[in-house]
Image (tube, rainbow, N blue to C red):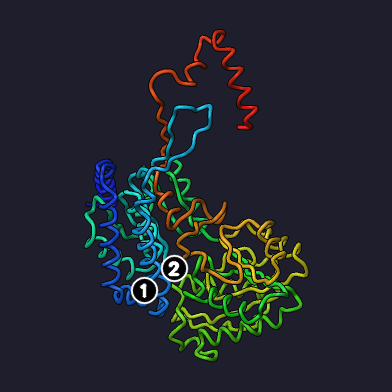
Amino acid sequence: MRNKDKVTVIFDQQLKRSEIMRGESVRKRSERLKSLRNWVINNRDRIKSAIYNDFKKPPEETDVTEVSTILLEINHALKYLNRWSTPEKVSSHITYLGTQAYVQFEPKGVCLIIAPWNYPFFLAISPLISAIAAGNTAIIKPSEMTVNTSNLISQMISELYPEDLVTVFEGGVDVSQALLALPFNHIFFTGSTQVGKIVMEAAAKNLSSVTLELGGKSPAIVDDSASIKDAAKRITWGKLINNGQTCVAPDYLLVQEQIKDKLVNAIQQEMENQFGDGGANYDQSSSYARLVNERHHSRLVGLIDDAKEKGAKVTYGGQTKDDENYLAPTLLENISRDSTIASEEIFGPILTIDTFRNLEEAVEKIKMHPKPLSMYIFSKKQKNINHFLQHVSAGGVSINETVLHLTHPYLPFGGVNHSGIGKAHGKYGFIEFSNQKSVLKQKSGLTSAMILLPPYPKAKKFVDLFINAIVKLRL
């Protein structure tokens, strides 16, 4: 059977099952999540091995950023699933006297999850947790660029669930196109803004709802009141985990000019301490991952070359090994506005450096780019922090920290406009995969609504009283 035909067959099977699942108990959803959790616990070494084989991601880093995050998210869902699934009562004001109203959360139905390569396990399974918690069926399309992890995800899902509940389709663009042609009830996509537009266009043809987790140029802002040591430590970690291949990685540094040199020196030292075995030994370090493939490596080297041709200066790093897809941590200064790296999301171990004199200038420089997925503010002055929070729109913010807001179980995660649509994780992920169905229950007999029924000449006095009541109550 051809891939396209099988995609359609499985979709139809899941569509039928999704209708049956509407009557299932929350307990069955919990059981599915528990079986997923047990598989992850029992196959932790296989997960680490697969991701290492894809791009030499350190096993400890996989534990922190892919295994533990999934386990925490499952635990959080199991703890609160009953509460999330319970209909939420809403109050009714006097003009709805006699009615009861509530919001019922129902499964959307058949869901498509298109996952990226940079966190190939976490970003495929995290939305699946929300989809299962909300009572849906799901098809996962993992990235063809991380073959070992994609194969492992396929094996895991086939061991845990029947095809009409959850299944995996591996492959390239042709598989994605075949899937996107189908009328999914919800599509969850993680990837670039450019591809996100294609996904949204395809979804629009079937009026499928979408969650788009995209990216953009996320700034790290450091003012002259910040702790230089702390800022350097946290910016370095956020930038270089996963070799910079993180959607919420600090994309560029915006530092108040009087502390620029001190901060840059501190970042260089932190790079060597955290990822270079105490020196600039990144190519030998067991803590430093690699770029995912030759094409991505060439793209980043091209960004550096283009920036240098237009006047940029490499103040640290820049060494490469093409046969290993290795690029050393790199700091670039004097970036021209017409260089590609000034406008394109970097997605690698390159940090560009810019300065500002005052808060207004910093805000204007950030606004030269579309709204970022994340913003990082390093400051001890609450007034300065508030200024950035008020004047810069971003999907999420960490203050005196990087990246951690992504994994906080009680916070919504997502972008805004170019950096994404919709929210994920925890209750927000559950809601994203649910239809919030409004329900109003009216009592029998005479009600306040009945006195407003036509014929209108007879009801005019009551309509006037109704309007006056609304005006007085400021409703």
The quarter of the picture where residue 287 lies is bottom left
Give the quarter of the figure containing the C terminus: top right
Q: How many marks?
A: 2
Q: Residues within 10 Å of mark 1 (few under 14, many from 20)?
A: many
The local secondary structure at tag 2 comes to loop
Residue 410 is marked as none
The local secondary structure at tag 1 comes to helix
Residue in front for this viewpoint, 248 or 63: 63
Residue in front for this viewpoint, 31 or 308: 31
The location of residue 355, given as percent across then percent down, is 72, 72
Answer yes or no: is residue 261 visible.
Answer: yes
Q: Is residue 268 left or right of residue 70?
A: right
Q: Is residue 187 left or right of residue 300?
A: left
The location of residue 474, given as percent across then percent down, is 64, 32
Q: Which residue is mark 2?
A: 118
Above or below, 368 relative to 300: above
Answer yes or no: is residue 311 visible.
Answer: no
- Residue at the spot 40% in from the left edge and 68% down from the top edge: 69
* Contact, mark 2 vs mark 1 (Cβ under 8 Å): no
- Residue at the spot 57% in from the left edge and 72% down from the top edge: 302
Q: Name which residue type carries label 1.
A: Ile
Above or below, 442 relative to 355: above
Q: Is residue 384 left or right of residue 26?
A: right
The location of residue 374, given as percent across then percent down, is 57, 62
Above or below, 296 relative to 461: below
- Residue at the spot 50% in from the left edge and 33% down from the top edge: 92
Q: Which residue is mark 1?
A: 51
Q: Name which residue type carries label 2.
A: Asn
Residue in front for this viewpoint, 388 or 177: 388
The quarter of the picture where residue 366 lies is bottom right
Above or below, 409 relative to 208: below
